[in-house]
Image (cartoon, rainbow, N blue to C red):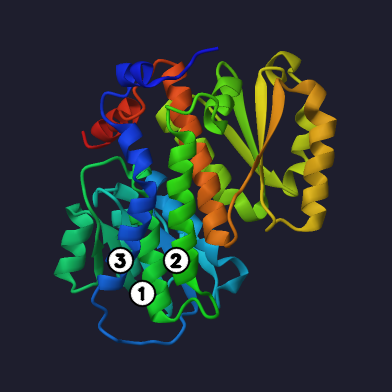
Amino acid sequence: MTMLNLDQIKQYDSEGMLRLLCTFSEQCKRGWEIGEALELDGGDERIPNNIAIAGMGGSGIGGDLVKAVLGGQSPCPIIVCRGYTLPAFVTSQTFFVAVSYSGNTEETILSVERAFAQGAQILAVTSGGKLKAFADAHGLPCVIIPPGQPPRASLGYLLMPILSTFVRLGFTPDLDFQSDLEETITVLAKLVEDFHPDVPESQPKQLAQALHGKLPVIYAPQELEAIAMRWKGQINENSKSLAYYSVYPEMNHNEIEGWKQPSALTQQCHVIQLRDPIAPYQTQRRMDITAELIQPHTAGITQVHSGGGSLLTRLLSLVAIGDWTSFYLAILYEQNPTPVGRIEELKRRLEM
């Protein structure tokens, strides 16, 4: 079994992804403070008809997590927009959040321009670029986050300022995020100690070993779809590996039948089931039974449980496990986890 020690990691992690993983709790704390420091003009304080959050990739996942954290507590619908178009219900009664770490994400820039034209109330979250220029030109509130690192390694800066701002605007009634934040920072800092390369048999190292040479299939309850999406994206970008995700109970009405053919492929799939008490009892039973039914057709099934008391803490604990797993998997594949060459080449060609 490969040890995944610091010497091996230094050989491939030449751009410091390990350092960024270790700062996640600090990012969350600083991100919250950045949101609290944002100057708000004290305009319309009514709850909007809907909230739309636009973003792609590592920037967009912050919107998915906002939606997951607020869950059924949000007083209005929250949608996440991934693409060039917006629904017609984005109007002056919409609170629109445009999130682009670089500030130059093509889809997000077009979306915010259209949202502005449709009269939406707009908040920008970025480190600069065209999005900041757009916000400055139109006098829009803009959260400025630290630049210079991959968006996927900047989740604390992309999530927490939005939550902090929503609290200040009164979009999160009856939720005590201050105590949740303190617990989250404590738990995430402890996970860094537990998952550090100096620890020989940590959970992420064991998961990475199980996933090495296999197709990761991430299953989660509908309430944790954002976490499953994050796991997939991190394995794609950090590990340079394909991965797949789906959610319960929907997969029980179709996909469960697919675990027969092609058998040569299913036997190379390792299933990760993400577990958290937020899932209804009925969904938990479905997950247990499904695991029993498909086990013979897989390379293995691993249950991954959240940790912590508050929903925010539990969700981000699962994020952390996935992030570290994808990092160790990158090292097993002898890959530098930071560069995303094909994404950059695609952008270059689109600009031609």
Q: Which residue is mark 3?
A: 33
Q: Nearer the viewer, residue 38 or 117?
A: 38
Helix, strand or loop at mark 3:
helix
Q: Which residue is mark 1?
A: 120
Q: Nearer the viewer, residue 102 or 308?
A: 308
Q: Which is more N-terminal, label 1 or label 2? A: 2
**Mark pair 2, 1: CA separation:** 10 Å
Vertical side of 124 occupied by 276: above or below: above
Residue type at tag 3: Glu
Residue type at tag 2: Ala
Indicate the position of residue 336 as horizontal and vertical percent values: 34, 22
Indicate the position of residue 323 as horizontal and vertical percent values: 46, 38
Q: Nearer the viewer, residue 139 or 270?
A: 270
Foreground tag (3 vs 2): 3
Foreground tag (2 vs 1): 2
Q: Residue at x 56, y 20 (%)?
A: 209
Q: Say if mark 3 contacts mark 1, CB within 8 Å.
A: no
Q: Residue at x 50, y 45 (%)?
A: 319
Q: Residue at x 37, y 56 (%)?
A: 28
Query: Can residue 92 be seen from the camera position used here?
Result: no
Vertical side of 147 occupied by 136: above or below: below
Determine which of the numbered discs, if any, sits on residue 52 in the image.
2
Q: Residues within 10 Å of mark 2 (few under 14, many from 20)?
A: many
Quarter placement of the C terminus: top left
